[in-house]
Image (cartoon, rainbow, N blue to C red):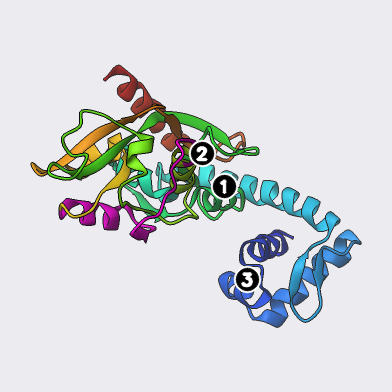
Amino acid sequence: MLDKLEYLLALARERNFGRAAETCGVTQPTFSAGIKQLEDTLGVMLVQRTSRFLGFTAEGERVLDWARTIVADTRAMRAEVQTLKKGLVGHLRIAAIPTALPMVSALTTPYRAKHPNVKFTILSRTSIDILQMVENLEVDAGLSYIDNEPLGRLRAVPLYNEQYRLLTSADSPLGDHDKVTWAEVGKIPLCLLTPDMQNRRIIDGLLHAAGARAEPTLESNSMIVLFSHVRTGSWASVMPERLADTLGLTERLRSIPIVEPEVVHQIGLLVPPREPMIPLVSALVAEASRLASAIRAD
């Protein structure tokens, strides 16, 4: 039964029978037969399909919710048993929005100092992707906005506030200002994240409210790409203050507060809402709480 529930989770992630079978390490006929056996056992149709996957039935969606719970609890049980035998060992997978990526090391570095036998995978994803990946057990935790989109059933641990700065060269049109307004920012060429990123949607909304419109001369889903262009002195961008400070400013580069309005959004750690928590995730939540306390004390 557990194998069949894992199949169902893989199908929810991949939305394709062939790719889902591949991620489960079985042939497509074996995978399809497993889904059919699960349907026969439960006595309901779970998947809408013809020659390809079309979606889940209403019953399939409810079974998918149960599958997430059962599989997650099983993994948690196995992880806890292993922790009792060997201490904290395993692989922690974290997905983060691009603007929060530089902060991940503030979590993973002290974590690894305490638990040297844990390995990490860090992925850059959109806020919407992160919600889905945590929900579907593709990652163990996410680092994302916690006040700007519905989080569903996920548990949030607040970390820090994101405030915005104009990054531009000192000799640019706004480079000599102590502060700038969103209306002024909207009048200069910018390089920004791609529209699928929540940071970009926030910036677009703020510029629109100021009577301006974002018309970037360069778009990327990587903050490093944006920052490398800004460092040349020929580009400008809007970035979170903490990110700009982490990446490092040069003598030619200025980080100018943006006001009217001065906007703050909260970044936090997102984890599944289950108890008992997987030991790897429980240790990460404890580290996040310590980091949040340290940031507040600064």
**Do the numbered discs 1 and 2 sit on residues whose CB atoms are within 8 Å?**
yes
* Residue assigned mark 3: 20
In the current view of this chain or complex, which residue is farthest to the right?
43
**Dot 1: element:** helix
Q: Which residues make up the magenta segment?
A: 208-232
Place residue 111 in its image quadrant: top left
Pick whichever of labels 3 and 2 is earlier in the sequence: 3
Q: Is residue 151 left or right of residue 94?
A: right
Which residue type carries mark 3? Ala
**Dot 2: element:** strand
Marker disc for residue 210:
none
- Kindly tell me whether residue 4 is visible in this rendering: yes
Pick the quarter of the image with the C terminus: top left
Which residue does the image show at 36% across and 26% down from the upper left? 290
Which residue type carries mark 2? Leu
Q: CA distance from mark 1 to mark 2?
A: 8 Å
Front in this rendered view, residue 177 or 102: 177
* Residue assigned mark 2: 270
Label 3 Cα neighbours within 10 Å, binned few <14 / some 14-19 / many ≥20:
many
Pick the quarter of the image with the N terminus: bottom right
Q: CA distance from mark 3 to mark 2?
A: 25 Å
* Residue assigned mark 1: 131
Q: Residue 163 location in percent, x, y?
A: 36, 31
Pick whichever of labels 1 and 3 is earlier in the sequence: 3
Q: Is residue 139 above or below residue 275?
A: below
**Dot 3: element:** helix
Q: CA distance from mark 1 to mark 3?
A: 20 Å
Pick whichever of labels 1 and 2 is earlier in the sequence: 1
Q: Residue 96 location in percent, x, y?
A: 42, 48
Q: Is residue 141 left or right of residue 178?
A: right
- Say if the magenta span includes residue 96: no
